[in-house]
Amino acid sequence: MLREIPEDASLRQQWDALLSRVEQPQVFYTYEWALAVYRAYGASLRPWLFLVHDGQDSLSGVAALAADTTGKQVSFLCATTGDYCDFLSAADQRPALVKAVLGQLKAQGIERLTLTNLPADSATIPALREAAQQHKFLCHMRTAYVCAQVALDTLERRGDHNPVLPRKKMLRRFLNAMGRENPVRLDHSRSCGAIHAVLPEFIQSHVARFLVTGRISNMARPERRQFLAELAKLLSDSGSVVLTRMMSGDRVFAWNYGFQFQGTWFWYQPAFDSDLEKYSPGFCLLAKVIEEAADNPALRIVDLGLGAEDYKERFANRTRETLFVSLRTSVLEHYREIMRDWASSAVRASREVELAVRSVLGWLERIRKSGASGALRGTARWLGSLLWSSAEICFYEWCGPIRQTAGTARIQRMELHHLASAVLKYADDEETLSYLLRSTRRLRSENGEGFVLLDPAGTPLHFAWASSFERTFVLAWRGKVEAPSPEDVLLSGCWTPAPVRGRGYGGQALELIAGQLSIRGKRAWTFSGTAGEPWIRALKKAGFRQRYALVRRSVLGRKTINFHPLASQDLSHEEVSARV
């Protein structure tokens, strides 16, 4: 038993040779995959590598596992990266391997063993049931995923031997639309250098695509990016890794970071340009991959991996099931696991029930984070606001000179790639990630005009939005606030990521945005609460002058919005009253 993945050429050779004795060899079972995981995630993983040798000191079994930080729970080392995970040995030796590993784990005081993505057709399944009973583990198994696959030898073919694919007319129309200037083609990067050259563009596209779908990509984590780079280094010599791009000229429409291994082409990590979503570039890329695979006699299967997306079902002609296996020493934990799985299945049966449960769980999580006292204070504030509440904001008009830059920073109109860059830069800032998801929805809905302040390297430093007065306040204040004049625009939705706060970027950004709007014949306004002293000082430094205030009061649920002039300001009471 080893607590690391050794950098050992002999072990590498024997490990990969052992795959020839496994029922269905997978690229996820290779020494290179385990080493890439260890190199990328070594700071947070504690490998438990079991190596079994026969009498001739030849490697006959491998179990690549990892313990959590407590040292009490063990899982597959590649559980979060591999589509399939398994114990490695010849099928007839699997019971002995599994029995030996579970015996060692029990001796080490392991109480929980969680094995994910274990193929349901593996010889490990009956071996686990038998070994679990012998070593007093309680075993529970359920379906994890049903992976769609395309068996190339059973594809229907036309007279020219090309495969018959679904939605042929739509596919041709979309490919023609994307290839107006140059034919659409597939470009494959297989060497380490070639993959590393295009990897940043692929990562940026993947992050942007996930933002559009309301999620944060796993590429946001530096460990995941390092993992893919390590795979390229380790698997490129054998030709197993291939980063495919669907292109027309120099324009890239879609990507797939995949593998060609032992007769299978793995659809592992796809991405596509969200601006071309109407042409279904991901669907088109998969269709062209299947067409190319069908012409390659060395390939038998295109494996579409984890996840039950609709587009995969259109191509699939077979499936492969994986299991989630839970081994526990505690009877209570065992039956709790069973009840949790049953409840989860029941909740997922109704979309409405699932949303309601997620809402309640989110509320409970917020209570957990704030503590009982924090939850009580929040509830008391909410109940108090139902009886009486008052809020005041002050409006500021920009009156400064027009500037194009603020030091070395510059302002640009917000685009999706700016938000994706921010995700990669501020992946540890949860509040900023939430803001970026909201901004993506707003950008896609064209609700206002977004701006971003960039440093010379293109790193986002501050975000802000320009929109109408009414659109900004009608939802939050449940009242109508009209602009002082038709050409006026309100700057709001300002955000500086936590790692770069306190450097004056907010004021710099608003000053540059106001200058750009002034060139277009617009006049910029913004607002602030009365308690935001640092922000008010930044606004005044940026050329904003306080003009008037609005107060919203709520008494027993009845809300009123009143204008309050600021006598010390340039505008008279009558002038401002006429504008509001």
Image: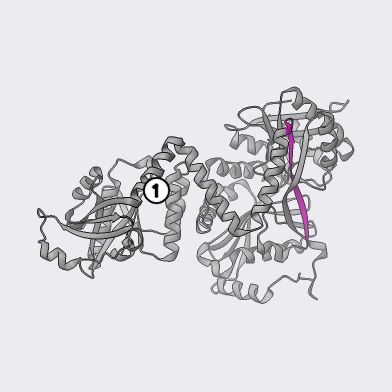
Q: Quadrant of the N terminus?
A: top right
Image quarter for residue 309?
Answer: bottom right
Which residue in the structure is indicated by mark 1?
A: 459
Q: Which is nearer the eye, 552 or 416? A: 552
Image quarter for residue 69?
Answer: top right
Provide residue 248's location: percent of width, then percent of height: 56, 67
Provide residue 286's location: percent of width, then percent of height: 66, 63
With respect to residue 8, does 260 lie above or below?
below
With respect to residue 512, does 122 lie above or below?
above
Q: Residue at x 74, y 30 (%)?
A: 329
**Magenta part of the protein: which range?**
318-331
Secondary structure mostly taken by the magenta-highlighted segment of the chain: strand
Q: In the image, 234: left or right of 403?
A: right
Q: Residue at x 72, y 42 (%)?
A: 338
Q: In the image, 469: left or right of 285?
A: left
Q: Amino acid at mark 1?
A: Thr
Residue 570 in sight in this render: yes
Q: Residue at x 75, y 58 (%)?
A: 149
Provide residue 162's location: percent of width, then percent of height: 76, 70
Q: Which is nearer the eye, 69 or 460? A: 69
